[in-house]
Amino acid sequence: MAELDEWTCEYSGLVIGSSDSALSLARVDGLLSLPDVRSSDLVLVQRDGLWPGDDYLDGRTVTLTVEVYGRTPGEFSDAWGALTSAYRTGRGEMPFRFRFPGIAAGETAYIMARPRKRGGSVDLSFAYGVSAVPVELFATDPKIYAATLRTERVSSRVGAPVFAQRGSDPARPVVEITDAKNPALKDELTGQTFGITYTGSVTVDSAARTVRTSGGGDITGLVTPGSVWPEYEAGKHRLTLTSEAEDVEATALLKWREAWV
């Protein structure tokens, strides 16, 4: 999808905030705040404190305050109709796309969400063609995702330059390694290395923790002992790829979608 203009958002095909629109954003709540934490701490019996467990995030609630304008009753009615049509209930989650400088590196990003509430009052302002409408979206997945995939290419002959992983959530890329013999992918800045005892082309899915051949066969069991699955925290990284077939250039193409919480 196309990059949005700054300070605009889009849901179900309706763009809010563009200069020629009768709909503008007055306020957005829930994108900067951390979703509620679901803790698994356990109560200690006859002792002070708790036994620390893992923390997980609940869903994310985002509330838009949309200002609806109309120079004529017809224009005002059309704007209200467009808003209620786009933000209607009863459908599955859809991408709520936005571009707000300071969030998600200032580029177009999205959450998967669905409308849960909509407000509005018929008052004096409404009679004059102006209305402030709170619209609540709920995302079962609390993460904010970059709209475009991030890619980095590494060669066994020329290492990749230093790159910055911008997402606050660790990147777990899909790595396509080609023309390699017993390859090893190393982050020179952290020292973490991932290797596979195999000759040919493979696809490493860091999130699923699987390795498959170009034919689809599962060879996860051939991961080199002591390997750390490719995972990159926010910050700088520099990758190198080694292959025992020195006469052939091996490459690794990393793909991931940056995410923030």
Image: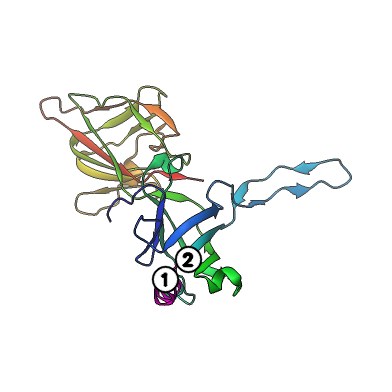
- Most common secondary structure along the magenta stretch: helix
The tag on residue 176 is: none
Contact, CB < 8 Å: mark 2 with mark 1? yes
Viewer-closest of 16 and 199? 16
Query: Can you tell which quarter of the image residue 150 is in?
Result: top left
Query: Can you tell which quarter of the image residue 166 is in?
Result: top left
**For this view, does 177 lie left or right of residue 167?**
left
Q: Callout 2: 10 Å neighbours few (<14), some, many (20+)? A: many
Query: Could one spot residue 139 in this view of the protein?
Result: no
**For this view, does 65 lie left or right of residue 157?**
right
Whether 74 is drawn above or below 237: the answer is below
Position of residue 235 measured from the top left corner of the image (x, y, whole percent): 43, 29
Dot 2 or dot 1: first in sequence order is 2
Query: Could one spot residue 162 in this view of the protein?
Result: yes
Residue name at image x 44 percent, y 67 percent: 93
Q: Secondary structure at mark 1?
A: helix
Position of residue 98 measured from the top left corner of the image (x, y, whole percent): 41, 53
Which amino acid type is marked by label 2?
Answer: Val
Which amino acid type is marked by label 1?
Answer: Ala
Magenta span: 69-83
The tag on residue 68 is: 2
Q: Quadrant of the N terminus?
A: bottom left
Whether 193 is drawn above or below 170: the answer is above
Q: Callout 1: 10 Å neighbours few (<14), some, many (20+)? A: some
Viewer-closest of 157 and 193? 157
Position of residue 222 measured from the top left corner of the image (x, y, whole percent): 32, 41
Q: Is residue 38 magenta?
A: no
Residue at image mark 1: 79
Residue name at image x 41 percent, y 49 percent: 7
